[in-house]
Image (cartoon, grey):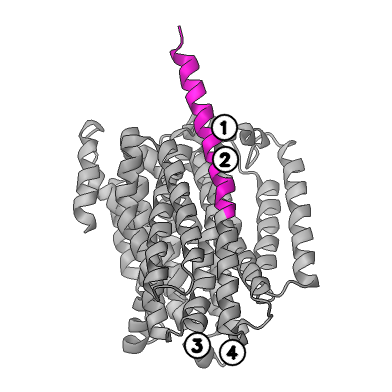
């Protein structure tokens, strides 16, 4: 399915110094697939790993958290390092690190060793995710950026969708080690492709003179780690520890902003957020990712407790969302190239609002079809928005800032997913009128679902207002340039 897409995008590369663009795109696709696959593949192995290492479920959960925390805390920093030292060079380092860490995961003799290897794997994944998006601007012409972003979105969705099923097959047939070792041949193939076909680094003068911001990197990493832990600790219950972590995160961000105004080569220049297009794009990405978690957090409870589906049917219904996202990513990118990224961002958000309200309105009607139909609308619109928003942001970035902006874009999505798991889950629990969803009556679960998805739609209305303001601002700017 992907081969003709890569070949079509690669046809635009005949003017770029005979660069075999299709192989470069294949490498970038693998660099997006592998980290996404490992985000979900380990989840299915947690019960087995708890048994193997004689650990509690809370302890083995850190196999997932160590990976996600490493990505979240370091993704902006590695993007900036790519701008300074070369994005291709650091991407190759990330692929190597991810592959080696996957091997260490597969041969880990103890749980602490596995956790350390997963954190190292998360560092490699952060490099791959940040620098893959940044490399698009150096690999494809600007008029094909949307298609390439759509392809990367498709690979991310495929990895997330494939993880649980592939993990289950590997564990059942070959043992838990293989859910990590499967990355080794993929990583070797990816490294060879990247080393051979990705364009060489072109050091910008500003980037070449810059130095890594150690203090800013440490403060931002600590603040993001505190926020991520605040959102994931407590299993949905917000207590004193969560509040303390949130306060620590706020203090860390304040210290980070203060530090960035005093260093010669900051990790992030506060002035860059004066760019309303960038700030709005990142804010919309965070909001949309927060909302999309409602389908992943609330959906299973609604389908099982309110509609009465068993686990197998719930899994099949839930897979419709990622599958649709995977199938619509590339077409959405092409449409953004043809009709304009800003216009398609607005269209995608409007589609999400319609789909989310439809999920709430059709609660209890038409059985599974009443959920799957609106879910298809939501996820297809999400894929459209994501491809268009990524294109808008990355198309207007200075070459020497592509790495750090790409890292911020990935960070906004990660923070949205982490926040959504906590916030949308809390809204669902409060709206259901119980602290124990597993024991709630079907009517309470259905009511909670309606309120949660209606709230999610209202959040996207806010994102749509930002998109419309940006679209109007861009039109005014264009008109003023056209005026004599």
- Look at the numbered disc 3 and give the secondary structure of its residue: helix
- The quadrant holding residue 199 is top left
Spatial separation of the CA atoms under disc 3 and disc 2: 43 Å
Q: Position of residue 66 (x, y in %)?
A: 58, 70
Spatial separation of the CA atoms under disc 3 and disc 4: 10 Å
Q: Is residue 3 left or right of residue 222?
A: left
Point out the tag, 1 or 3, that comes first from the N-terminus: 3
Residue stretch rendered in magenta on the structure? 458-484
Looking at the image, is mark 4 or mark 1 nearer the viewer? 4
Answer yes or no: is residue 140 visible.
yes
Point out the tag, 2 or 1, that comes first from the N-terminus: 1
Point out the tag, 3 or 2, that comes first from the N-terminus: 3
Callout 2: few (<14), some (14-19), or many (20+) C-alpha neighbours within 10 Å? some
Looking at the image, is mark 4 or mark 2 nearer the viewer? 2
Looking at the image, is mark 3 or mark 4 nearer the viewer? 3
- Look at the numbered disc 2 and give the secondary structure of its residue: helix
Residue 209, numbered label? 1
Do the numbered discs 4 and 1 sit on residues whose CB atoms are within 8 Å?
no
| Residue behind mark 4 | 55
Up-down: is 356 above or below 215? below
């Amino acid at each position: 399915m992907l081969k003709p897409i890569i070949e079509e995008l690669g046809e635009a590369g005949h003017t770029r110094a005979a660069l075999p663009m299709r192989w470069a795109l294949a490498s970038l696709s693998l660099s997006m697939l592998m980290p996404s696959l490992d985000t979900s593949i380990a989840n299915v192995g947690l019960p087995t790993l708890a048994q193997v290492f004689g650990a509690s479920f809370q302890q083995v959960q850190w196999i997932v958290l160590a990976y996600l925390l490493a990505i979240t805390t370091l993704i902006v920093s590695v993007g900036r390092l790519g701008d300074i030292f070369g994005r291709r060079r650091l991407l190759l380092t990330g692929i190597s690190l991810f592959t080696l860490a996957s091997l260490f995961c597969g041969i880990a003799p103890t749980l602490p060793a596995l956790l350390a290897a997963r954190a190292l794997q998360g560092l490699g994944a952060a490099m791959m995710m940040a620098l893959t998006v940044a490399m698009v601007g150096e690999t494809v012409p600007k008029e094909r950026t949307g298609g390439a972003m759509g392809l990367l979105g498709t690979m991310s969705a495929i990895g997330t969708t494939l993880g649980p099923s592939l993990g289950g097959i590997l564990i059942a047939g070959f043992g838990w080690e293989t859910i990590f070792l499967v990355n080794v041949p993929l990583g070797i193939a990816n490294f060879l492709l990247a080393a051979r076909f990705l364009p060489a680094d072109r050091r910008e003068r500003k980037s070449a003179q810059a130095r890594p911001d150690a203090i800013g990197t440490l403060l931002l990493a600590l603040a993001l780690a505190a926020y991520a832990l605040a959102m994931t600790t407590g299993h949905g219950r917000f207590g004193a520890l969560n509040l303390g972590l949130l306060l620590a995160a706020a203090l860390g961000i304040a210290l980070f902003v203060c530090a960035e105004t005093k260093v010669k080569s900051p990790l992030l220049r506060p002035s860059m957020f004066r760019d309303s297009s960038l700030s709005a794009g990142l804010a919309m990405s965070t909001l949309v990712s927060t909302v999309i978690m409602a389908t992943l957090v609330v959906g299973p409870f609604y389908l099982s407790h309110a509609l009465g589906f068993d686990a197998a049917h719930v899994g099949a219904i839930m897979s419709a969302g990622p599958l649709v996202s995977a199938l619509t990513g590339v077409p959405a990118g092409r449409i953004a190239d043809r009709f304009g990224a800003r216009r398609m961002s607005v269209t995608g958000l409007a589609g999400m609002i319609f789909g989310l309200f439809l999920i709430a309105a059709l609660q209890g009607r038409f059985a599974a079809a009443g959920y799957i139909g609106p879910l298809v609308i939501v996820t297809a619109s999400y894929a459209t928005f994501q491809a268009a928003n990524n294109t808008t942001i990355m198309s207007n970035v200075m070459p020497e800032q592509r790495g750090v902006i790409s890292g911020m874009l990935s960070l906004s999505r990660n923070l949205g997913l982490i926040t959504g798991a906590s916030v949308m889950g809390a809204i669902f629990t409060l709206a259901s009128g119980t602290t124990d969803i597993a024991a709630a009556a079907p009517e309470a679960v259905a009511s909670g679902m309606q309120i949660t998805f209606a709230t999610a739609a209202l959040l996207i209305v806010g994102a749509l207002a930002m998109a419309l303001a940006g679209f109007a601002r861009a039109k005014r700017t264009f008109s003023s340039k056209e005026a004599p």
